[in-house]
Each structure stands twice: as C-alpha cells, then as structure tokens.
Image (spheres, helix red, strand yellow):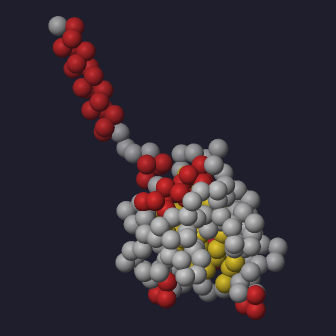
Amino acid sequence: MKFTRRLILAAAAAAALSAMPASAADDHTLYLDTKDGRVTIKLRPDLAPKHVERIEKLAKEHFYDGIAFHRVIDGFMAQAGDPTGTGMSGSRYLDLKAEFSNTPFKRGVLGMARQPGDNDSANSQFFIVYADAPQLNGKYTVFGEVVSGMDVVDKIKKGSKSNNGMVDDPDKIIKMRVAGDES
C-alpha cells in the first residue's frame, strides 16, 4: 500500500512538473545591454545548434562583457565579439563548422562572423544586420534575430567607410546574458 501511494505521489509530481511552462533559459533568449538600452535576441538552435551553444556558453562566462562593436557599417551591420577589438581574434575555443541555412539575412538577423575564404572559422564574433543583406545568404551562419531593441542597435556608433567600418572609440556591450542567468 505504501509503495502504491508513493508511486501515485511521484507520478502526480512528475505530471505537475511537466505541465509547468518552460523557463526563459529554455527558450534561448539572450539579453545584450548597451549604454543606449537592451536588445532582446531570440536564438535559433533549430538553424545552428552548435553556434547557439557557443554563444550561450560565452555569455554565461561573461565573455562579451565590455567587448566593443569594433566594426559598424551604416546601413549594413554592427560586428562585435573580438576581445582585442581588431576583428582578428576570438575565444579560447576551437572554431566552429558552418551551419548555413536558407534563412535570409534581413533587418535584425544575427550571423556569425568568419575569416574570408574559410567557412569553418566562426568562433565568437557575430554581427547584426541593419537591413536586408541577400549577399550574405547561404554564406554565413544565421543563429538568431532581434525581437526587441533594434532601435538600440541603430544607435551603435558607426565606423568610417574609408576604414571598412572600423570604429574609433567604439560603443561596447555592457553585458550579454542568457535569460534566467542575468547575474
């Protein structure tokens, strides 16, 4: 009798837990804070599971805190994720293999930066496009999209066209966190 009652209680507890809504961390939401406000990003593990895993891991390690938007081209994209601010570096982890998809680069989409000519060189650098960028489709990994705060992205300091968008005294990411892990 005691065993049956425990089994029923365990089953009821399991059913209650499974009926609970998923936490924000489970829905792959990322918060990127700048001096001008917060950008909320919906990550897309359905398109690029390894890239989403990397971005979430680095955000949980606070890797992106204080990182500059080192290359920002008006009307095209804002790029960040290089700890040196030169566009030539990344995290301590191995580069990722490309996870290209048919998802188009449209305003607010996030892609992983990589070295020219090497599809499998994405590491920690990413970019947010300001406008539709069909020239990137199928050539860079899409891993997320801005769901709110694109007005904040629009305010990121732009670089000079003569210097391929490299920014003097660039705006920085104050902090970037996975939802539910905002310490």
Residue at 76% in and 87% down: 163
Quadrant where the image shows the N terminus: top left
- Could you tell me how many numbered marks the image carries? 0
**Does residue 100 sit above or below 37 in this rendering?**
below
Residue at 70% in and 78% down: 71
| Residue 29 visible to an observer of this rendering | no
**Does residue 178 sit above or below 161 in this rendering?**
above
Q: Quadrant of residue 92?
A: bottom right
**Does residue 161 sit above or below 19 in this rendering?**
below
Residue 32 horizontal/vertical position (percent): 62, 60
Residue 139 horizontal/vertical position (percent): 47, 81
Residue reaching furthest to the right: 169
Residue 6 falls left or right of residue 62? left
Residue at 27% in and 22% down: 10
Residue 140 falls left or right of residue 165? left
Quadrant where the image shows the C terminus: top right
Residue at 43% in and 80% down: 138
Residue 72 horizontal/vertical position (percent): 68, 79
Residue 6 horizontal/vertical position (percent): 25, 15
Residue reaching furthest to the top: 1
| Residue 138 visible to an observer of this rendering | yes
Residue 75 falls left or right of residue 140? right
Q: Nearer the viewer, residue 53 or 3?
A: 53
